[in-house]
Image (cartoon, rainbow, N blue to C red):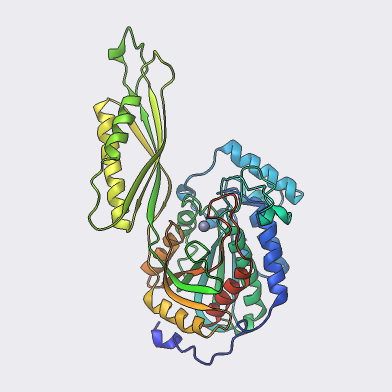
Amino acid sequence: MNPHEYTQVNDRTFLFSGHELPEDERELIRLRRDFHRHPESAWTEYRTTAVILRELRAAGIPVLYGPSLHEPSCMYGLPRPEAAEEAFRRAAGELGGDGEILPMRGGFTGCMAIIEGGLPGPVKILRVDIDCNEVAESRSAEHRPFREGFSSVHEGLTHACGHDGHAAIGVVTAKMIARHRDRLPGTVKILFQPGEEGLRGAASMAAAGVADDVSFLFGGHLGLTLTKPGAVAASAVAILSSTKLDLRFEGKAAHAGMYPQLGRNALGAAAAAVTNMLAIARHGDGASRINIGTLHAGSGRNVIPSSAEMRLETRGETAEINRYMLGEVRRIARAAADMYGCSLTETIMGSADSAESSPALVEHEMALLRQMKEVGEVIREQKFGAGEDVTTLMQVVQDRGGQAAELMFGTPLAAPHHNGSFDFDEAVLLLAAKVFAEIMFSL
Ligand SMILES: [Zn+2]
């Protein structure tokens, strides 16, 4: 598409910007608080998805869900089957039956709304994430969700990254767009993605082809480094590339006193791997990280340890730097296993590369945002400062000649992300919904 065809946004009539929309705002807050009360972690967003389905269907919006939206070989970091089943039963109990969520059993959570416009135009997608964090929520009177009675009823789980807000934004944006579908050019898809935490869900949906026919993709995050109310960033930069990896060394048990020569020491292999991984020569082109977060090995004091398991992650400022770190990790792990006569198995638990917003699309957003009354400050680039697997979907779209952007929405925060006292200013919800809705009508 020629950029000149869509950068002409001057003097456009806004359908949402400049309007009060009190009902949409009430609905955003109602949904956000409902999701907040019932947080669900990666691949167990059964109730969350069911609520989204009910809302969209009640508004007459077609929605897809279940295994057709996923590629099982790319469903990274699935929970243990017992934990997944427990979450499924919990959701069924809360929903008053498992009829709606049966097709999702086994982790096939999330859904995709499809709104066909009355005018010719491109296919556009808004991706929002819907999972929570595995952290306990604060029970302090200072913490507004607790004080006002909408804190988590699921022990050890909290929406501490704002994805409760993102899910609400997705639902209400879909409804706002659908109300004016006669004037909508092309088709809008709203993708409710599970498992963003740990970078687990996007690869599965990308591999299932959800974004294959898309010309424009948008993602967004509230808060993070943008804490000024009313500020909107057209593009997030410095989204770190990261890979989450489990390694298992398998050796051979033996009597440590009588027959040590018959054993193969998996603990030794893992320990050698750890110290050498921490000593990987750093890449000259930018920041890199490695963390070996857990290491469990052996079975008893007088037994040559026959197995060792470690959980680790690599990060890089660019995809190339992360690939370099991962390549070194693998080389060292293989060599350490070899040195101790052990075998090695690797499981990828999560992965996403960094991606950059498309410059022409950012330009278009800037022009639009500058005309929206409720946007207090328009920022071209805002540092993201974390990983985010929307990049996997952005790359799919960009590789196929489309354009993509990750936006950021400013809000004061009560505590940092992933902290049990996290909370944000709900005024950001309507702002984000208006921005996304206007963007969809402008392309
Ligand atoms: Zn997040």
Image coordinates for residue 293, horizontal then vertical, percent: 42, 39
Q: Nearer the viewer, residue 183 or 120?
A: 183
- Residue at point 66%, 55% (across, down): 36
| Residue 50 in sight | no
Question: Which quadrant holds residue 305?
Answer: top left
Q: Residue furthest front?
A: 142
Whether residue 166 is visible here, answered yes or no, is: yes
Q: In this view, does 210 lie to the left or right of 26?
A: left
Of residue 241 and residue 161, the one placed in the foreground of this image is: 161
* Front one among 380 and 342: 380
181 is higher (above) or lower (below) than 262: below
Pick out the residue farthest to the bottom.
Answer: 11
Residue at image location 74% in from the left, 54% down from the top: 149
Q: Nearer the viewer, residue 421 or 102?
A: 421
Residue 371, how many percent across, how many down?
52, 86
The quarter of the picture where residue 381 lies is bottom left
- In which quadrant is the N terminus drawn? bottom left
Residue 33 place in picture, x, y as percent: 69, 59
**Image-based side of 131 in relation to 25, left or right:** left
Q: How many marks?
A: 0
Figure check: 138 above or below 303: below
Q: Where is residue 391 in the image (x, y as percent from the top left)?
A: 42, 61
Instruction: State whether residue 69 is above or below residue 77.
Output: below
Residue at the right extreme? Answer: 96
Residue at 43% of width from left, 57% of height from top?
386
